[in-house]
Amino acid sequence: MPTRYRIVLPILSLAVLLIATFWMQPRTMSYFGVNLLFNLAVPIALATVAQMMIIMVNDIDLGMGAFVSLVACVTATFLQDTPIVGVSILMALILTYAAMGALIHKLDLPAIVVTLGMSFVWGGMALYILPAPGGTSPEWLRTIMTIKPPYVPMAVVAAGLISGITHFVIMRSSVGTLLRGIGGNGRSVARAGWSVIGLKSLAYGMAGLFAVLAGMALVGLTTAADANIALRYTLLSIAGVILGGGRVYGWQGFPNGGGHRCADADACILLSQLHAFEPGLADRGAGRDPDPRADSTVDFHPAGGTDMRAVIGRISRPWIWSWLAAVIVFLMTVILTEGRGAGELAYAALTFGTFAAIVGLGQMLVITLGPGNVDLSIPAAMALAATVSLKVMNSEANSAMIGLLVALLVGLGIGVANLALIYLLRLPPIIATLAASLVYQSVAIWSNRGLRIKPPAELADFATGRVMGIPNIAVVGLILSILVWVVLERTLWGRWLLATGQNRRAARLAGVPVEAVRAGAYLTVSLLAAVAGYLLASFSGGAALNMGAEYLLFSIAVVVIGGTSIAGGLSNVPGIWGASLFMFLVVSMLNSYGAAAGLRLILTGLIIIGIVIAASTRRTRL
């Protein structure tokens, strides 16, 4: 899309949304109505600017919502009675954000996994500071956020100020030029003599500053806080940046305006307008691997024996680390319990890990397509498929296969709808699937109508049963995993998928049907999400509207922790299972140690980051 349209489109979108709102509710066309409509736009806009700073340097932050929630808890707890302590904590959080950026760059860590791990840390700290909703907003902050300037509501005035400041920093300052340069070609910036690690730390520090302002503004408007107050800001901030005209890699910023469409009750304004450009493909030229982990070949002596590099090659395979982490955590739990319940723990890990593995397989195929490809409709697809299939079965005997067919048809329909948004409307996949998920969730609510229909008895028995000590659910998951592995490793489509992820342009020139491959990946992820929802509802005794919520970020986490390259072009089926088991066993281990809820979250996040650092350090050393 041309640059001028990228800049104008969000503004027109907001105008259309306002016109529709004013037409349906004429009373909102007033000072009070507009102020009420955009009341919570300021914190969302600040969080979007913070996310923009991260995306501008080719990273993405999955902990933004948890961080804003933590800031809100600190603001509501300390700034009123002990302001010095509160300010010190907020400054420390900003410095921690800057240090996180330096660590990601120094060790070449996947930002999406590090920030996901930090989301647990932020959430645990928030829960430790404010275990229950409460606190109070400082009077001065409340006064600032409720100022009523003449003629124009405060939210609109704040929008202009934030937009102007951000535009100056990104577009008019030398620092902004360097930050945009990192997003375009970091090596060129380094060759020019600038410290890339310092600039990336600065970008993360600026993101932390804007996120702190977002949390404070939120408390000033709501007058209180809780540990989950801004969790939705993670997806809203990503959506806001991309709706403003950007992509999840290689950015230039135009933060001087633009409306933010958002199917959220907050009715927010987007203040970040970005223009994306295609990044260079120099790092993926002929003969170069898209990821250091892609080379797992074994060298042989002419005489037939293997040398030490063969052993090292096997040890350094990326899936080893997720399985090693899972085994270590399992053994630590067994040692703590003196061996009691080891079999039950393994059985539970296989059962609950299967659901994450199934959705992870689908997400893996989409992520393998390359940067910008991710499916955020997985939780809604699980809920809708489970709700509709159970409603059709209506607990009747011998209806399990009919229910499975219905679930698959729902998944297929969701995949087709997602593709229509991506191809016909040319929406970025992250926006198309996020927006569509809200529609699917609404359909699930309409279909469910508060009822919890139980699965047929034989289906429930199958879902909770076992064969030779292995859960039936796990057997199904293993069969699906083998099918996906065979497709990836032994079929032409699998080679096309990897080629598309490594270099889409080169694949297209080589005759690969890139769009057909992409369509197959998005259809498959929806089908697998539908199967996971069907099995989970059968196992748990019914469908729930939020049954898939935890699998949104988990589906991404198990993919990356399992060794699949976030840059695309490399899939890893065994690693999906190792990461899924690891994620479940970590929580079980911390529960066995009797850790409090907040501490459990903090340790879970630190363990995830530790595993990623260990794998990255080992890979670099080899």
Image (cartoon, rainbow, N blue to C red):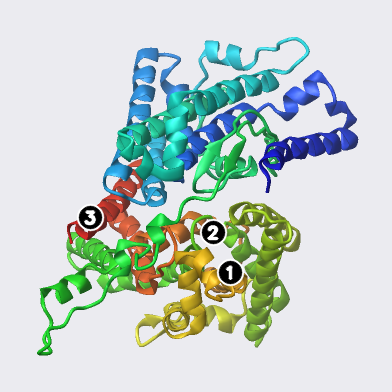
Q: Secondary structure at mark 2?
A: loop
Taking the spot 55% from the left edge, 21% from the top edge, the residue there is: 165
Residue 258, by quadrant, is top right
**As rendered, which of 222 and 238 lies closer to the eye?**
238
The mark lying in front, picked from 2 and 3, is 2
Q: Amino acid at mark 3?
A: Ala
Point out residue 607 in the picture as x, y percentages from the top left corner. Answer: 28, 51
Residue 402, by quadrant, is bottom right
Provide the residue designation for mark 2.
373
**As rendered, which of 272 and 28 lies closer to the eye?**
272
Q: Secondary structure at mark 3?
A: helix
**Above-or-below relation of 587 to 263:** below
Q: Amino acid at mark 1?
A: Arg
**As rendered, which of 487 and 383 lies closer to the eye?**
487
Asked if disc 1 and disc 2 are in contact, CB closer than 8 Å, the reply is yes
Provide the residue designation for mark 3.
614
Residue 561: mark: none
Label 3 crowd bin: few (<14), some (14–19), many (20+), radius 10 Å:
few
Judge from the rendering whether residue 461 lies leftward or rightward of residue 96; answer left or right. Answer: right
